[in-house]
Amino acid sequence: MASDAAPSASKKDRIPGQSFLPLARVKRIIKEDPDVSLVNAEATHCIASATELFMEYLVSEGFSRAQKNKRKTIFYKDLASAVSQTDAFEFLEDVIPQTVTLEEAYKRRQRADDGTNGSAGTGKGDQSAATKRRKLQDKLNAQQPSELKDTDTQEQDDNDEADEDEVEDEEEEVDDDDEEEVEEEEEHDEDEEDEEEE
């Protein structure tokens, strides 16, 4: 009887039209981009599927490196090795860099602070594309915050002016209310005095 039952889909079998990643979360991540205001369900599904395939490729490359070291567990160093040795993952070199010792990190920082590319026999040809990209990205990041700061400052100034206008309007309303109350009290007092005199 067990053989008569249809084979059930396991977690690893891909079901057409479904994604392992939660589509609502993928859609939320897509909408984090300020240039994107709307995204339809088909586009969200395509991006989720592409992300799954990308993750599968990255993990399989890391797993092959773990197998070379006779391990079944994938470590960070396996993924970092896959990123550094596979051209398709070159854009991830800043996100998943090779691990270095603390001593080596201090030496690299010292060389960067001194403005040299390494005085121990290394030349300009040793500067990697990732280092060039990193320097260019640092320059862009240095420029962008000032532009964003100007925009934020302008927005803050606009918000401050709007808040000041609201406060002034409220103060005027309070002053008008106070004046009306004072006038009503004076009229009430005058009425009471008139009644007492009679």
Image (spheres, rainbow, N blue to C red):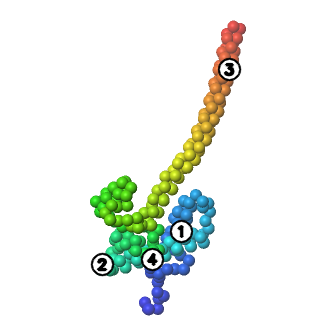
- Closer to the camera, 124 or 132? 124
Residue 36, compared with residue 157, is above or below; it is below
**3D distance between C-alphas at marks 1 and 3:** 64 Å
Residue at numbered disc 4: 57
Task: Please tell me whether mark 2 sits on a helix, a strand or a loop.
Answer: loop
Task: Please tell me whether mark 3 sits on a helix, a strand or a loop.
Answer: helix
Q: Position of residue 176 (x, y in %)?
A: 66, 26
Q: Is residue 95 visible?
A: no
Eye-nearest disc, 3 or 2: 2
Q: Which mark is residue 147?
A: none
Q: Amino acid at mark 1?
A: Leu
- Judge from the rendering whether residue 114 lies leftward or rightward of residue 163; answer left or right: left
Quadrant of image for the C terminus: top right
Question: Label 3 neighbourhood size at 10 Å, few (<14), some (14-19), many (20+)?
Answer: few
Q: Residue at x 33, y 80 (%)?
A: 67
Q: Earlier in the sequence, mark 3 or mark 2?
A: 2
Q: Amino acid at mark 4?
A: Tyr
Eye-nearest disc, 4 or 1: 4
Q: Residue at x 32, y 80 (%)?
A: 68
Q: In the rendered structure, are the residues bearing label 1 and label 3 in contact, judged by CB atoms less than 8 Å apart?
A: no
**3D distance between C-alphas at marks 2 and 1:** 36 Å
Q: In the rendered structure, are the residues bearing label 3 and label 4 in contact, judged by CB atoms less than 8 Å apart?
A: no
Q: Position of residue 7 (x, y in %)?
A: 46, 87
**3D distance between C-alphas at marks 3 and 4:** 81 Å
Question: Label 1 neighbourhood size at 10 Å, few (<14), some (14-19), many (20+)?
Answer: some
Q: Amino acid at mark 3?
A: Glu
- Judge from the rendering whether residue 21 lies leftward or rightward of residue 68; answer left or right: right
Residue at numbered disc 2: 69
Q: Earlier in the sequence, mark 4 or mark 1?
A: 1
Q: Earlier in the sequence, mark 3 or mark 4?
A: 4
Q: Earlier in the sequence, mark 2 or mark 1?
A: 1
Residue at numbered disc 1: 23
